[in-house]
Image (cartoon, rainbow, N blue to C red):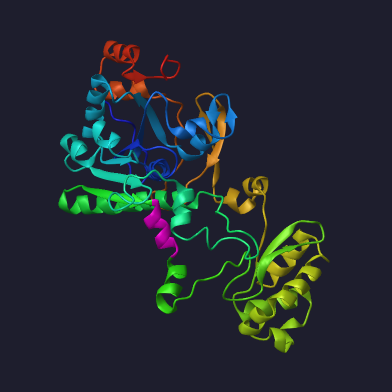
Amino acid sequence: MTQPAASGGPLAGVRVLDLSTMLAGPYGATLLGDLGADVVKIESHYGDESRHLGAEKRGERAPFLALNRNKRAIVLDLAKPAARDAFARLAATADVLVTNVREPALSRLGLDYASVCRHRPDVIWVGVTAFGADGPYAGRPGIDFLAQAYAGLIAGNGDPSAPAVRVTAPLVDVMTSMCVATGVLAALRVRDTTGKGQRIDLSLLDVLTHAQATVLQSWLLVGEVVPRTGNRSHFFAPSGVYACGDGRSLCITCPSSKFFRNLCRALDVGWDGEPRFARTEDRLRNQDELDRLIGERCKEFSRDDLLARILEADVLAAPVNEVPDVVRDPQIRHNDMIVTTEHATLGPLAVTGVPIKLHDTPGSVRRAPPVLGEHTRELLAELGYSADEIARMIGEGSAGEPGSSQA
């Protein structure tokens, strides 16, 4: 069997099968690919749902491109025997399998833990669900938005004078993807020691409950429900978004009296010497007036001039960037968080980079997000199929490649 070239990353030699769709599962597999794993994305002829959503260019969609770098793609119709045979061969080579397929389809397709173990007894199997693998909500469909509702994030988010709102960015999915990678790394460590694989269950609900720890602890400790504060903080003041004279805005926050004094020096005001603003408790009690004063003073500067001024004074501040600003940001560029790959149909394609910076065995973006079925022939050949067998599988629809009638 032909093996793919080693990536050189810390997970070189580890093979991951990605049978998940949308965000949490695929992005977890992507992170493992970033760290050097050989990630094989197995899709139906329809493909990952994210291939059909969002901004589009020459048939490729932004959500899929954002979430699926460092993968090879194969199309298999697992309802057909020939495709299930190919899957069995692939599973026998896999160290890790990631799926978010729900029951009963999970077992019907042979993707449940027990079935996969028949092909690879020491496999590390990761199942991602919305609410849990068992229990009263098991089997319910769910996405990031619903997890935010169940775990109290929506109720606690937004301006206190307006209706509660969701967090727009899919942070629950992204946090879950990081837990996918963390769980796999822990299980690989255990397998290195014991020789045994294991099942890992992750849910969006559990991950967000974990993220809500400080909010939940206030209730568990003293029965306090932390109120919605908008851009303000429940614990200190000032903290907010302030418009500058050129119409652009800054985020400024002062979690201690030291930072408030620094802000006052930068703004050339003496508010820190006034009793109404002397202590954290005083500033919280009088934050309406404090915000008014800061807002008026900020309008006397352009945003960039004020930002330079207050950063020089060691104040916690940041520009309120729009998306184009983020892509151009010099620190984000310096951190290699926007990198260029070569896509099969789009040519040079900018994607986000690897957030984990290992110095001795760094990860990297080695592959562009694949088009549907891009590596079907390559992978089937690695599994020992002849050219004629591969052509027959594609012709009958058991497998698919770009441009085939089903894919």
Locate residue 127 relative to residue 224 in the image: left or right.
Answer: left
Quarter the C terminus occupies: top left
Say which residue appears at 81% left-offset and 69% top-offset: 296
Q: Residue 251 lies in what quarter of the image?
A: bottom right
Residue at 54% x, 24% y is: 59
Q: Position of residue 174 (x, y in %)?
A: 46, 49
Q: Position of residue 309 (x, y in %)?
A: 74, 68
Q: Position of residue 380 (x, y in %)?
A: 30, 22
Q: Name the side, left or right, on which 334 lies relative to 43.
A: right
Q: Nearer the viewer, residue 220 or 34?
A: 220
Task: Report if residue 338 is visible in the image.
Answer: yes
Please state which of residues 278 and 341 is positioned toward the viewer in this rendering. Answer: 278
Question: Was residue 193 drawn as part of the magenta stretch in this picture?
Answer: no
What are the residue bounds of the magenta stretch?
204-212
Q: Is residue 357 visible?
A: no
- The answer to whether 359 is drawn above or below residue 296 in the figure is above
Using residue 74 as the reference point, say whether residue 118 is left or right of it.
Answer: left
Q: Is residue 341 above or below residue 325?
A: above
Magenta run includes residue 208: yes
Given the current orientation, which residue lies at the most extreme bottom position?
Answer: 275
Left/right of residue 51 with respect to residue 303 in the rendered view: left
Pick the quarter of the image with the N terminus: top left
Q: Position of residue 294 (x, y in %)?
A: 75, 72
Between 394 and 304, the one nearer to me in the picture: 394
The residue under the point 78% across, 74% down is: 293
**Can you tell which quarter of the image residue 315 is in?**
bottom right
In the rendered image, which quarter is residue 209 located in?
bottom left
Q: Main secondary structure of the magenta part?
A: helix
